């Protein structure tokens, strides 16, 4: 709604300036570093929480499949359990040696 009368034009300019000032205040508030960091942290927390849920769902699904296969063929399940136990022992030995040598990795 533009006008050709000088007083109305001035009034429109002042209204536009006021609106621009408010818009700038809102933008500068949203761009404050602590607010940006807060939004970013919340986004990361949301993604991590979602990933944790997805991971638990996948692990549960794999456990069910593994259980069903173990029931079908107990020999394979025993071999897999033995392999997992051997891997666990090997991991413990390596960790103990690193600890003795003073490594923290």
Image (cartoon, rainbow, N blue to C red):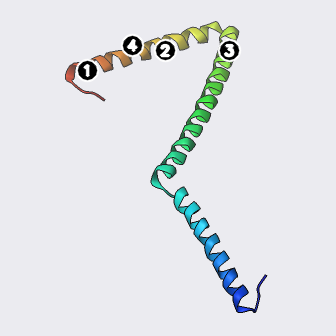
SS label for mark 2:
helix
Image quadrant of residue 80? top right
- Nearest to the observer: residue 1 or residue 98: 1
Precedes in sequence: disc 3 or disc 2: 3
Q: CA distance from mark 3 to mark 1?
A: 38 Å
SS label for mark 1:
helix
Image quadrant of residue 64? top right
Precedes in sequence: disc 4 or disc 1: 4
Q: Is 56 situated left or right of 33 in this image? A: right
- Nearest to the observer: residue 5 or residue 92: 5
Residue furthest to the left in view is: 101
Disc number placed over residue 69 in the picture, else none? 3
- Residue at label 4? 89
SS label for mark 3:
helix
Q: Quadrant of the C terminus?
A: top left
Precedes in sequence: disc 3 or disc 1: 3
Residue 31: x, y in percent? 51, 58
Residue 28: x, y in percent? 52, 62
Q: Is 27 situated left or right of 98 in this image? A: right
Q: Work out whether 58 lies above or below 28.
A: above
Precedes in sequence: disc 2 or disc 4: 2
Precedes in sequence: disc 3 or disc 4: 3
Q: CA distance from mark 4 to mark 1?
A: 15 Å
Q: Residues within 10 Å of mark 4 (few under 14, many from 20)?
A: few
Q: Work out whether 75 lies above or below 25.
A: above
Image quadrant of residue 30? bottom right
- Residue at label 2? 83
Q: Work out whether 84 lies above or below 24.
A: above
Disc number placed over residue 99 in the picture, else none? 1
């Amino acid at each position: 709604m533009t006008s050709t009368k000088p007083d109305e034009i001035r009034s429109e300019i002042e209204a536009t300036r006021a609106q621009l000032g408010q818009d700038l205040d809102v933008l500068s508030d949203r761009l404050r570093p602590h607010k940006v960091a807060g939004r970013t942290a919340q986004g990361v927390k949301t993604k991590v929480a979602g990933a944790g849920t997805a991971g638990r769902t996948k692990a549960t699904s794999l456990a069910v499949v593994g259980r069903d296969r173990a029931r079908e063929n107990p020999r394979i399940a025993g071999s897999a359990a033995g392999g997992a136990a051997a891997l666990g022992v090997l991991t413990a030995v390596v960790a103990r040696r690193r600890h003795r040598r003073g490594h923290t990795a």
